[in-house]
Amino acid sequence: MSYARRFVRLLPALLIAAGAVYDHVTPTDFTGAPFLTAAPLVAAPLYSQRGTVLTGALALLVVLVMRAPRGELSQAEVVTELATIVVVSVLAVLINLLVRRSDERLASAREIAEAAQRAVLPEPAERIGGFRIAARYEAAQEGAAIGGDLYAVQDTPYGVRLVVGDVRGKGMGAVGAVAVVIGAFREAAEQEATLEAVAQRLERALARERARRDGPESQEWFTTAMLAELPHGNEIVRLVNRGHPPPLLLHADGTVHPLPATEPALPLGMRELGAWPDRADDAGFPDGATLLLYTDGLTEARDAGGRFYDPEVGLAGRVNALREPAELLGVLAADVRRHSGGGMADDLALMAVRRP
């Protein structure tokens, strides 16, 4: 627990102590009642219902202990102080009850969102087709569980196939598009002989979903996507880029370089703006190397000075110490949050594949 959080949780007790000290060291005309009255109100959102009641009772007890020896309990001012603390304590208990109910509803909604995330974006197995694989989803908004970023892995007769993508937009509409893309990918990855044909299947799936929904929001749907294929027995990676940030190849010697598309294509869902055949690029993928795919939440994260995060610079020379894909993604996610001061502008999906 951070020092700030500890201080906040101690604040009701500190207020009661301050009220007692103030009442003791000041003349009789002065009173520490404002401190004592504030204590149960501060405790309401911080403590349990029992803790809130005890805070109010302790504030009331302090007034009794301070005033009784002086014979002041019958004075109008003291009676008013006691009545005020009682009324405020009752209100604090009611506030505490409302806060707890709100927290329960929020926790329930968060559990539902996490269940949806696990259903739409299941965690891939650590080993698929001889490769070590890890994926990670980082929500820009703390507490959010799912958005428009996606990833999927499939071991097929043609090799291990992967997709990492980013659906335009947020909310349930984006989640629906994510489900469409991943469902189409899993089916096409098993059936289509080429990665280019897989991309075309995803294009058609989005077009069908757009026609089915037939709303202004669906008409603006598009998805940037990076599709990759790791053929069995070959030390290559085959890539089809549909308007997505290029992946990085992390070599065993610590060097890092991007794999840009020879012929960049439009994102999925934008074929009405222009159509041309997808063309895959092949690149070497030697033993000990790691392929890193990511969404633009990584490269669009800015620091206080407005500088974008550069994963190529951030990972250069650190690859040897980050052999495991899960460890690599953990360090990378922490690095980008540190760069942006914890205030990322967009969600982030990461996938790392290492050839042992």
Image: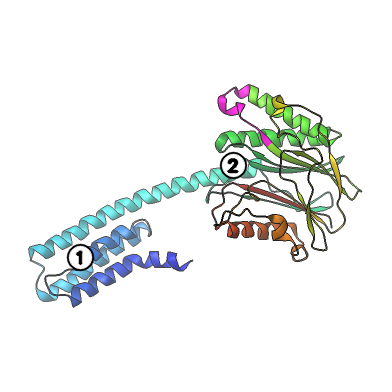
Q: Quadrant of the C terminus?
A: bottom right
Mark 2 belongs to which amino acid? Gly
Give the quadrant of residue 12.
Answer: bottom left
Around disc 2, counting alpha carbons within 10 Å, would you say few (fewer than 14), some (14 to 19), or many (20 or more)? Answer: many
Query: SS for tag 1?
Result: helix
Give the quadrant of residue 267.
Answer: top right
- Magenta span of residues: 212-223
- 33 sits left or right of 125 in the view: left
Q: Which residue is mark 2?
A: 147
Calculate the distance from the C-alpha at mark 2 to the C-alpha at mark 1.
Answer: 49 Å
Q: Which mark is residue 33?
A: 1
- In the image as oriented, which residue stretches furthest toward the right? 233
Q: How has the structure been colored for display?
A: rainbow
**In this orientation, does residue 73 appear?**
yes
The mark nearer the N terminus, 2 or 1, is 1
Mark 1 belongs to which amino acid? Ala
Q: Is residue 163 magenta?
A: no
Q: Is residue 215 magenta?
A: yes
Q: Residue at point 43% right, 50% down?
A: 103
Around disc 1, counting alpha carbons within 10 Å, would you say few (fewer than 14), some (14 to 19), or many (20 or more)? Answer: many
Q: With respect to residue 167, does 209 lie above or below?
A: above
